[in-house]
Amino acid sequence: MKYTRLGKHGPKISVIGLGLWQFGQKAWGKLGNTPKEIFHAAIRHGITLYDTAEIYGNGLSEKLLGEALNAEGVPREEIIVATKLAGFNASSGERALRSLRASLRRLGTNYIDLYQIHWPPPRWCKLCDVLRSLEEAIEKGLIRYIGLSNFSVREVEEVRTCLRKYDIVSVQFQYSLAYRAPEKGLVPYLKREGIGALAWSPLAKGALTGESKGRNFARLTDPVYKRASRDTELLKTLKEIASNHNSTPAQIALAWIIAKGVIPIPGARKISHVISNAKAADVALSDDEIKRLDDASAKYLGTYGGFSPLGRNIPCVIQKLMLRIIGI
């Protein structure tokens, strides 16, 4: 495994993380191994960044991560625990701190390394109040760093004007060979500002692995997955480059993201997925191979239609209800 720093001021992390949306999430179907087995396999293969959220499984993902995190022999000081504050709970500083304490209880830890706002709250909410409360949480040792998720460049700048003592260290966003829209503004902005970049759904929910047999709610409702799983040109290019490296298409897709200076956080439903993903850190793509992948996926530079952050004009209570209904 290789390691890097998350932005200019963030922690040292593995160049590949593990996303834990699947933990406790019915939309993905059953796991092939237990969460604890998957977590421990990731540790053995050098992965140090673990990303979850309070809404995943209505807190169950955090709880399962906490149980694995607190097992005997786990080096907590080497693990970067990242979780997220739901946008509907980022309506005030007081509410945000209540959510933070609830996440700490579920995780069974004294502090959270990276605490991210999952998506922007409604426009009328006291965003600056929330961020200053998170700065106070840093002062109290409850969190180490502040991050964002699914924020536009304009919204990132709005957040940064609120902060007085600390800056954000990272922004998380959807990014893959099948979803390259962030390259038009967000990715260069983060690079210029020295802010870390984290990519969720880096394999387009499995479409870029070359195996699209698995059918579940998470995939069937995702237009990015549907497009990528039928993209014969891109899948052929991935397979050809993979054969040059004795690798898999998934490993090449992850290596491409790393080559772009972004940290992918793929999910894993079984131990074999973890092992495969971790090996992507050792794949060194040539400039020509990166260009071939760029060309085969150029059509996705202007394509949207993946995750749509809940509108900033939707009240918090409606947001919460909507997410409960779709089973996030």
Image (tube, grey):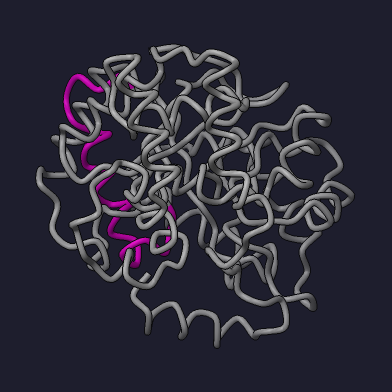
- Name the image quarter holding residue 248: top left
Say which residue appears at 77% left-offset and 27% top-offset: 194
Say which residue appears at 37% left-offset and 57% top-offset: 230
x%, y% of residue 282?
39, 12
Residue 7 is at least partly visible in this image: yes
x%, y% of residue 139?
68, 36
Q: Nearer the viewer, residue 41 or 36?
A: 41
Residue 155, compared with residue 161, is above or below; it is below
Assess whether residue 98 is covered by the magenta stretch.
Answer: no
Say which residue appears at 25% left-offset and 27% top-offset: 276
Q: Nearer the viewer, residue 308 or 243?
A: 243
Residue 22, compared with residue 112, is above or below; it is below
Magenta residues, start to end: 53-75
Quadrant housing the C terminus = bottom left
Q: Is 184 displayed left or right of 176 in the figure?
A: right
x%, y% of residue 233?
44, 45
x%, y% of residue 2?
44, 12
Residue 162, compared with residue 7, is above or below; it is below
Quadrant housing the N terminus = top left
Q: Is 244 displayed left or right of 215 in the figure?
A: right
